[in-house]
Image (cartoon, grey):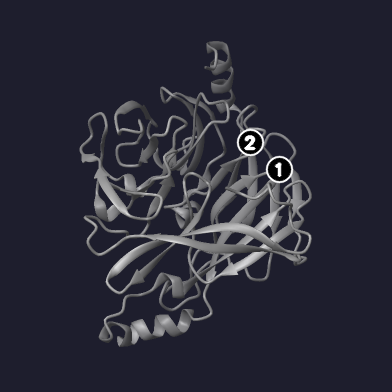
Amino acid sequence: MISMSRRLSLVALLAVPALVQAQQVVPISTDLPQCSVKLEELLSLGEIDDPGTIGLPTWITRLGSGDFVVATPGNGAEMMVYDAKGRYRESFGSSGEGPGEFLAPGMGRLRPSPDGGVVILDPMTRRITSLSATRELLGATQIGGMMGMNFLPAVSGSGFIVGGWGGAADGNPGGVTRMIDTEGATLAEAGAVPRERWLQQFFFFPMTTDSEGRVWRAQPTEYVVEAWDPEDSAVDIRLEGSPDWFVPGPPQPGYPLEAPGPSTIMDLWYEDGLLWIATTVADREWMEVADAFVVGEALEQGQTLDGNRLMDMVIEVIDPTTGALVARTVHDEFLWRTGDGAFLHSLRQDGLVPQAVLYSPSFEGENCPQPGTLPG
């Protein structure tokens, strides 16, 4: 636990403007690496006779038992459990605002707990709830006046890093990143991202923590990732790039049917000294798919507007100390990171059945990191 004197000193830092220290700006290299990211398809979740559905967005995490917990807005307060082979096992979660109840866990995030349980962020109850491996309530943390969209356990183990929508310490609304203790008290806060830019990443709010306890978060409408140190409330490293494939937002008038989709960093993770950045870009079929939908051809054929044909995912692995591009791939699907950090997953339609397809990432090619340094 953080001592009272330590807590007071951290809270006092909220009065200090962000970016008070000189930043180390690290350009991201555009030199293409010989190493690439390989995505091996492992299994899918979702069958026609399952009592729930898999929708957009869908959040997944793997528990210590090997089971997967799935939350999506279409299921309300209920979350589904699948075994390690992708077979449906059970559902849990009741609707309400009381202890152990949920309103919209599918809009938040799921993370595994060290004891084999699951930790759930519900933006609507503004609460992080911890359940045991047998779904018993272990504790809950109110996150205050913000709508939390993503969270991580603090490296110290004494609280959480929460990112979401709310009022910052300076009174301006926008995208806020906070370190809170287990009682919900704010210990430190990063500078807010302006509302008009942050809304582009509303459901995602990508962030990750490194081995030094710094929080890396993406900047909307830019190919930029910054490291925030809650210990001194400063953003001390800024990784920035300007690749020719990155089309910044906000979207043009008519989006999404008449304009290219804006490129947006949707997920980050840090493993073994490397930073993984997953960014959406417009698919080459964008206009073809959108035009067909506009003129009604897709509807006449009983099709829906397939997000995987509208957007691709660029995954780049970067050395944050030098900006060197270590590995890269372009995947023809929209991908999410699982809450346990071991897999990536996409959403597909198999006939009438929506499914989540899980992938295991690895490196292949020349000059790749050695085995044992891969994520997961």
From the image, tell me which residue sits under label 2: 214
Q: Is residue 37 above or below residue 108?
A: below
Quarter location, residue 22: top right
**Can you tell which of label 1 and label 2 is closer to the viewer?**
2
Label at residue 136: none
Find the distance from the CA under tag 1 to the CA under tag 2: 10 Å
Tell me if label 1 and label 2 are in contact, CB under 8 Å: yes
Q: Nearer the viewer, residue 87 or 323?
A: 87
From the image, tell me which residue sits under label 1: 237
- In x, y percent, where is residue 358? 46, 59
Q: Amino acid at mark 1?
A: Ile
Image point (62%, 31%), residue name: 233
SS label for mark 1: strand
SS label for mark 2: loop
- In x, y percent, where is residue 178? 51, 34
In the orientation shown, which residue stands out farthest toward the front?
85
Mark 1, other Cα within 10 Å: few <14 / some 14–19 / many ≥20: many
Of the image marks 1 and 2, the number of the one nearer the N terminus:
2
Image point (35%, 75%), residue name: 305
Image point (34%, 83%), residue name: 294
Q: Is residue 168 above or below residue 231?
A: below
Image point (45%, 75%), residue name: 309
